[in-house]
């Protein structure tokens, strides 16, 4: 279900069903975040129904079934890619067979513009990069990370990254010529550098690879050359300055947070633990430095919070909460 609520009051303005819901022990409902572009909202349901809705009233403008159009198997935990708007294109991971793993649609009509790769679907979302002076879209599929031409779908480079059940979930972090990826399920993390060959083509080189970070479902944040993420066992920080071939890892106790999600807000991290604990944390590679915390809910929280205009929006398995963080 896609819902539009009043930011201050929580009053419902409209709702739109996103097709049949995928129900599992890990939670029900959509896995992706809706994308707003002008007066349009793009929302992907857990079973592959993609919808373009009018922001003002939730009216459907067009829709597409990823499974049917791209011959895409249903991923174990459902479709989870958040659509990326780039100019006139809508870019997303479909996991379709026969060169239809990643796709570009006309954002106004839903018409297919190009498809590429043969990888299974992961659970990550694409990002735009200008690595090695070339504009590209970076996809983290179920078996690799790759950079493609966003206009034509040509593959610039690809780095294999196999994970149990194609569980590559965290969105890559791109900074300059570098791409940072991390996965759980006994995989780990890697820093890659995109380079330009003498003939102008692109290649990718591994800077380092280790298992000090193993993102389960949340995406790392990057600040002051430090990546911070949630692993299965603890919150961890990994110094990953682009000029260094090796980093120095620091690991802090997670307190009551365990796995969870995090946001960078100014010079602090807002951490939401899966057990419903919200914490304010200082981002440092040396140790976990919690400044304040409180328990918001007793239900599991696996959804990334949203911060807007001093309000923090948090969702557990049943309810949505709005926390006013502004100074009184």
Image: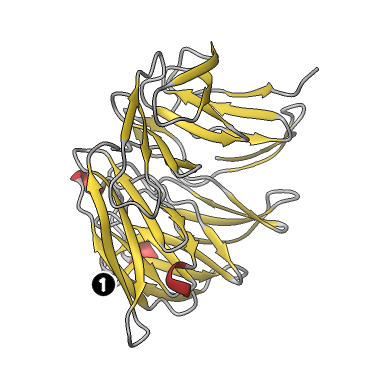
Against 86, residue 14 (above or below) is above
Left or right of 205? Residue 64 is right
Left or right of 224? Residue 245 is left
Against 199, residue 24 (above or below) is above
Residue with the mark numbered 1: 98
Left or right of 14? Residue 28 is left
Against 65, residue 280 (above or below) is above
x and y percentages locating residue 259 in the rendered image:
37, 26
x and y percentages locating residue 177 in the rendered image:
42, 64
The residue sitting at the front extreme is 244
Question: Viewer-proximal residue, 320 or 312?
Answer: 312
x and y percentages locating residue 311 in the rendered image:
69, 29
Q: Residue at x 23, y 55 (%)?
A: 161
Question: Viewer-proximal residue, 11 or 282?
Answer: 282
Q: Secondary structure at mark 1?
A: loop
Quadrant assignment, res 273? top left
User: Which image quadrant: the N terminus?
Assistant: top right
Please indicate, yes or no, whether residue 317 appears anywhere in the rendered image: no
């Amino acid at each position: 279900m896609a819902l539009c609520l009043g930011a201050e009051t929580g009053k419902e303005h409209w709702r739109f069903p996103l097709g049949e819901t995928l129900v599992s022990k890990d939670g029900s409902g959509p896995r992706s975040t809706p994308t707003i572009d002008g007066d349009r909202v793009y929302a992907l349901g857990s079973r592959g129904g993609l919808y373009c809705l009018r922001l003002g009233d939730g009216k459907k403008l067009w829709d597409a079934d990823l499974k049917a159009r791209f011959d895409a198997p249903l991923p174990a935990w459902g479709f989870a890619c958040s659509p990326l708007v780039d100019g006139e294109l809508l870019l997303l991971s479909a996991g379709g067979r026969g060169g239809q793993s990643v796709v570009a649609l006309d954002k106004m009509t839903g018409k297919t513009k190009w498809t590429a790769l043969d990888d299974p679907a992961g659970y990550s979302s694409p990002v735009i990069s200008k690595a090695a002076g070339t504009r590209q879209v970076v996809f983290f599929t179920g078996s690799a990370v790759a950079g493609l031409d966003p206009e034509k779908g040509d593959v610039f480079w690809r780095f294999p990254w196999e994970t149990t059940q194609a569980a590559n979930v965290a969105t890559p972090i791109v900074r300059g010529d570098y791409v940072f990826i991390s996965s759980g399920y006994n995989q780990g993390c890697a820093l890659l550098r995109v380079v330009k060959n003498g003939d102008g083509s692109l290649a990718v080189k591994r800077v380092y690879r280790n298992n000090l970070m193993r993102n389960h479902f949340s995406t790392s944040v990057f600040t002051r050359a430090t990546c911070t993420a949630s692993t299965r066992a603890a919150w961890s920080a990994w110094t990953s300055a682009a000029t260094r071939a090796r980093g120095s890892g620091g690991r802090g106790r997670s307190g009551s947070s365990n796995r969870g999600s995090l946001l960078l807000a100014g010079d602090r991290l807002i951490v939401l633990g899966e057990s419903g604990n919200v914490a304010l944390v200082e981002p440092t590679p040396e140790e976990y430095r919690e400044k304040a915390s409180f328990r918001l809910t007793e239900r599991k929280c696996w959804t990334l919070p949203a911060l807007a205009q001093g309000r923090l929006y948090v969702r557990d398995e049943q309810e949505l909460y709005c926390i006013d963080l502004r100074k009184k």
